[in-house]
Amino acid sequence: MRLVSLLPSATEIVYALGLGDDLVGVTFECDEPAAARAEKAVVVGGKDTRAMTPGQIDAYVRGRLAEGGDLYTLHADALAGLAPDLILTQDLCRVCALPSGHVTDALDHLGCRADVVSLDPYTLEEVFGTIRAVGEAASVQDRADKLITSLRARLESVARAVAGRPRPRVTVVEWVDPPFTAGHWVPDLVTAAGGDPVAASGGKRSVETTFAELAAPSPQIVLVTPCGFHLEGAIEQARRVVPHFPGAQVWALDADGLIVRPGPRLVDGVEAIAAILHPAAVPSPPPGAIARVH
């Protein structure tokens, strides 16, 4: 089966299921594992925002959406040339990846026949469901079941380690300019790690808010997890957050690696958050995962 992934989390799921050799196309943002972008055809492009500030990125996104424009470009001819059997895409967030409708329209126009599976989880449990969906679509259900079982076992290990310990109040800042609440599956990660997520929108889209509202529940710990950034960028943004939470610990996390991509590495995120909340009970994560800023 020839697979194309149009979002980074799907690429990670594909490799976790042992299907890397079947993957023929990815997006310009698929950087995990490194072989994905180095060895596969890139069929979705987009603007390079690495030199832009969070405020500039937000203004660019809002402007494009207000104009009815797209944030991503599908290289339709390249996609057709790959002759895919299965395409993995999403409708969860127009800011995060190309919507599935764009893909279907392009395939119809090109006369390309492929199954399109949209992965749209809002909770951690639904993320496991997307792993199962990919496994079923690629006829490797047994691998998906084994992967999910192993991920659940790791979550259970964290739960045992933090059981009976006080659950600190945790605010997660998903964007800093303007500030956004933690949404989708992110509050689930905090809960699984032994924390009490506050000022959050679990199972719902992240929404714009104010730092006053994020600080209102008096969080003891603040996690800064800006979408699209690894640890270095998160640290820079976390420093801007510190003045708004003078009485709290402020931590930066590798957001793309641990928090915002709905794939297997979310369990790495739970383990990393647990190490922040309960350092005496849970081992520290590998270097490059977390950093205390305040």
Image: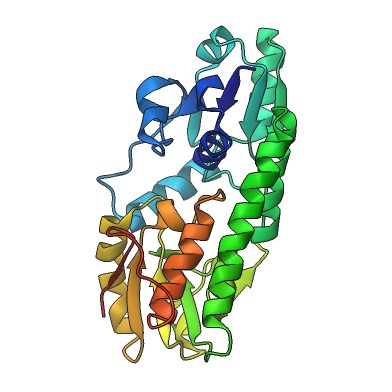
Image coordinates of residue 189 in percent, x first then y, are 55, 67
Image quadrant where one finds the N terminus: top right
Image coordinates of residue 59 in percent, x first then y, are 40, 52
Image coordinates of residue 78 in percent, x first then y, are 50, 12
In front: 66, or 135? Answer: 135
Task: Indicate whether 202 appears above or below 29.
Answer: below
In front: 217, or 65? Answer: 217
Q: Quadrant of residue 106?
A: top right
Work out whether residue 91 can be spotted. no
Residue 103 appears left or right of 217: right
Image coordinates of residue 184 in percent, x first then y, are 61, 61
Residue that appears at 24% across and 45% down: 51
Task: Indicate whether 125 appears above or below 247.
Answer: above
Residue that appears at 68% across and 12% down: 109
Residue that appears at 66% across and 53% down: 149
In front: 222, or 64? Answer: 222
Image quadrant where one finds the C terminus: bottom left
Q: In this figure, which colouring scheme has been used for the structure?
A: rainbow
Work out whether residue 228 can be spotted. yes
Residue 247 appears left or right of 76: left
Residue 132 appears left or right of 245: right
